[in-house]
Image: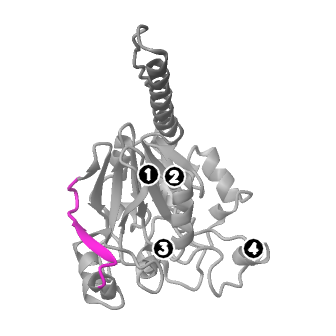
Amino acid sequence: MVILVWISTDTRMSRNKHFVSSQKQITLLFLFWIINAYTNVFGQVSLHILGTAQDAGAPQIGCKKECCISLWDNGIQENVVSLGVIDNTIKTHYLFEATPDIGQQLALLEAETRGLTNMSGIFITHGHIGHYSGLLYLGKEAMNGNNIPLFAAKRMADFLRKNGPWEQLVLNQNINIMELVPEKELKLSSNLHITPILVPHRDEYSETVGFIIKGSQKTALFIPDIDKWERWDTAIENLINEVDFAFLDATFFDGKELPNRNMDAIPHPFVVESIQRFDSLSSSEKAKIYFIHFNHTNPLLKRNSKAFQLLTEKGFQIAKTGMKFEL
């Protein structure tokens, strides 16, 4: 809504006073136009996809397979999974995950805000390389951050405090670790609330959390990494029902992608399993689901693949870098 403020003038004023008052009117109108134009362009809270690939990106280092060759040859790169959230009401923005591509991703997010918001924190899901290794670039050798709020659950926070080189970021006050309590809502502003939720995963160094990101109008669910759905004591369908957008783990399309690996040791829900599980959902519920976090072998990275076509025909969505959602 555009708000216009007009200061009435006394017609009995002198011509000079009337001119000064008119100038004030024009200035105020212009300021309110700027404020409203900013809000109309950006909305109150927006979520941005900054990357969709698994921890090592795509193409992946050392990969000489067909899935990577065309990407290498054509200079195509998909950044590691990350979200950006902008809260225009208090001029802040946040990163979800600190990936190896953090420099480019932060630049993309700041370009969206046209430099009108400030970096106010980073949320980390867990301690696997693609989700936290970008923190290195907050150190004195690079950004030299100044007490950037770093939101992480307890084990992840302890890992960063007690192990090098991450502890240097704490000692040098590049980051300020803010411990998250699972299931406890964190109010960042009147229009932006974040709730971490514990999910089952390979937790060598930390627990793993997903995030419920609640804006003033809509809510998103972000679970880039999880073990098989049936290993979780929460029914994922219930969470999908409660949100407007669900960004869910799609690391592997099926179990054939890594023939030389024991897939039981990396038990992500295959996309084909998720398709089967969610098959009974209504079309509106399916449309909420955006698959994300693709391994470099995942055919969903290629829009002309049969897997991509199957997923879209089934009514599901595929997350793509550059997508924007109003919350």
Disc 3 or 4, which lies upstream in sequence?
A: 4
Q: Which residue is mark 4?
A: 75
What whole-number distance in Å separates the C-alpha atoms at marks 4 and 2? Answer: 27 Å
- Relative image position of residue 20 (x, y in whole percent): 46, 25
**At numbered mark 2, what does the secondary structure look like: helix, strand or loop?**
helix
SS of the residue under disc 1? strand
Please name the amino acid that badge 1 sits on.
Ile
- N-terminal of the pair, mark 1 or mark 2, is 1
Query: What residue sits right under mark 1 in the picture?
Result: 86
Which residue matches tag 3?
99
Which range is magenta?
172-185
Residue located farthest toward the top when viewing the structure as drawn: 12
Of circles 4 and 2, the one toward us is 2
Q: Which residue is mark 2?
A: 113
x and y percentages locating residue 28 in the rendered image: 45, 30
**Residue visible at 47% across and 35% down?**
31
Q: Amino acid at mark 4?
A: Gly
In the visual, does 326 lie left or right of 298?
left
Rendering quarter of residue 304: bottom right
Q: Where residue 138 sits: x, y (%)?
A: 42, 78
Q: CA distance from mark 3 to mark 4?
A: 20 Å
Disc 4 + disc 2, Cβ < 8 Å: no
Mark 4 burial class by Cα count in 10 Å: few <14, some 14-19, many 20+: few
Q: Are marks 2 and 3 in contact (CB under 8 Å)?
A: no
Confirm or deny contact between disc 1 and disc 3 (CB under 8 A). no
Q: Nearer the viewer, residue 92 or 308?
A: 92
Is 116 rendered above or below residue 224?
above
Amino acid, disc 2:
Thr
Q: Is residue 173 magenta?
A: yes
